[in-house]
Image (cartoon, grey):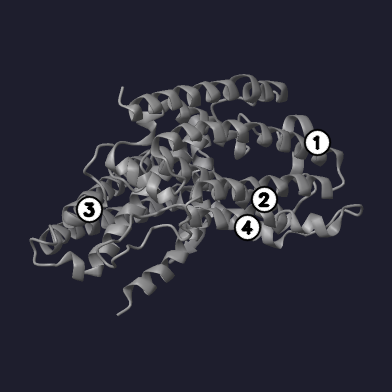
Amino acid sequence: MNYEFLIEFAKIGLVFIPLTLIPVMIFLERKGAAIIQDRVGPNRAGIKVFGVEIRGFGMVHNFSDVVKLITKEDFVPARAHKAFYIFAPMIPVATAVITPALIPWFGPMTHITGHGINGAVLDFNIGLLFLFAISAISVYGVVLGSWASNSKYSLLGGMRSSAMMISYEVSMGLSILGLIVIIGSFNMTEIVEWQARNTWGIVVQPLAFFLFLTAMFAETGRTPFDVAEGESEIVGGFHTEYSSIKFALFFMGEYAHVVIASALMATLFLGGYDLLPVPGFDGRFIADNLGFVLAAVLLAKLAIFWGIARLIARQRARYMGLKASDAVGKTREYRLMGGIFTFLGLACLLAAILAVVLIGRPERMGFELNHAPWVGVLTAFVQIGIVLAKTLFFCWLFVWVRWTLPRLRYDQIMGLGWKVLLNVALINLLITAVVVKIINEGF
């Protein structure tokens, strides 16, 4: 059976990971804002299932928003440049679909085929440069949409966004060059493999990490760098004249780029699919100890599910003491959701036991790694989960920063980019180059 072809074909689905995480990102945004601001957050939209109204702690609001945006009136301003006005929202979403293809989601499967199957759909020697080039195109959607709207408020937001992104792309590129000088490759898979053999990028380039993180906040247009929107200054910025599905495409692109930026930082500085920041815990270690690694992952999920069930139980007990009009319905939902998470925890516990008993260490259980493609597939799933866990950590960081820091003034943003970040990135690159040269010369 041609396993290589099947795996290569299945890899195409990886490019849709950022799009599937958009509802999760929106949920994190809303609930994160509510937690930070000490309020309840979205909790009213619901769907009745078998007589119980399911609100999903605000998750149903995502679906209601989709229905609202699809059914709203879709209009084009009278004096807008219609072709560009319609085309502009497609650019951010298109770039959000292409760029994930360059990120390695799992390690090379050298035990299935002789040359190995890489975890990136598009595995280029200049993959990192190509990713930066494609992601930079997204700014054209903002600029083109703001100009095509024929609105002075939209145009002002688009001009501020383009100037900011051009400024911070310079610092972003220079900050990552220090890591490239050390590793010696632009290939994304080789970057992760180097970190697996040595240590994570954040350890060898901590200053570059913070520079890159700041530049990513600016590139995604998130607070404190959301000058393209600036509701308190320019009405709504570049999307003032947009509505319905075109408005939704802009924000889908924004959240997808947050996910991609998070995955990119996890790949470059947190080892990507590497398990720990010390040598020896790479894909080979996961494959050799597959059953135990799967059990550890499942037990971590068990702790999360039962922790959520415990929080739901506490919330149900608190809500039953309130004289709320929907107290009965809410307690029913809490009881149902608590039962679901408890059941999921039990399923994870059973699966962890089976993983240790049935798989354990595949070679000791009599499975030849060179003739057991399922070992490579399960290892890839574990590595994909590692990348997603690191990605979601950075997604939460984006939310945390947005609802903690105030928006900077435009002149402060440009000053930070050109007077501070650029100079620090140049100094970091210079010091890194000198140190690498000294080490390579053997002094």
Q: Residue at x 71, y 52 (%)?
A: 247
Task: Say which label, 3 or 1, has the lower sequence index.
Answer: 1
Total numbered labels placed on residues in the image: 4
Q: Residue at x 77, y 51 (%)?
A: 242
Please tell me how crowded label 1 is: few (under 14), some (14-19), or many (20+) other residues with Cα within 10 Å.
Answer: some
Label placed on residue 250: 2
Question: What residue type is disc 4 on?
Answer: Ala
Decide if residue 349 is in sight here. Answer: no
Res. 442 image quadrant: top left
Question: What residue type is disc 2 on?
Answer: Phe
Please tell me how crowded label 4 is: few (under 14), some (14-19), or many (20+) other residues with Cα within 10 Å.
Answer: some
Q: Helix or strand or loop: what does disc 3 sit on? A: helix
- Residue assigned mark 3: 284
Residues tagged 4 and 1 counted as in contact (Cβ below 8 A)? no
Residues tagged 4 and 3 counted as in contact (Cβ below 8 A)? no
- Residue assigned mark 1: 156
Is 112 located above or below residue 307 in the figure?
below
Q: Helix or strand or loop: what does disc 1 sit on? A: helix
Task: Say which label, 4 or 1, has the lower sequence index.
Answer: 4
Task: Say which label, 2 or 1, has the lower sequence index.
Answer: 1
Task: Say which label, 2 or 4, has the lower sequence index.
Answer: 4
Residue 333 in percent (x, y) is at: 41, 54
* Position of the N terminus by quadrant: bottom left
Residues tagged 2 and 1 counted as in contact (Cβ below 8 A)? no
- Residue assigned mark 4: 94
Q: Helix or strand or loop: what does disc 4 sit on? A: helix
* Position of the C terminus by quadrant: top left
Q: What is the distance, in whole Å, between disc 3 and disc 1 at their CAs?
A: 52 Å
Task: Say which label, 4 or 3, has the lower sequence index.
Answer: 4
Please tell me how crowded label 3 is: few (under 14), some (14-19), or many (20+) other residues with Cα within 10 Å.
Answer: some
Residues tagged 3 and 1 counted as in contact (Cβ below 8 A)? no
Decide if residue 121 is in sight here. Answer: yes
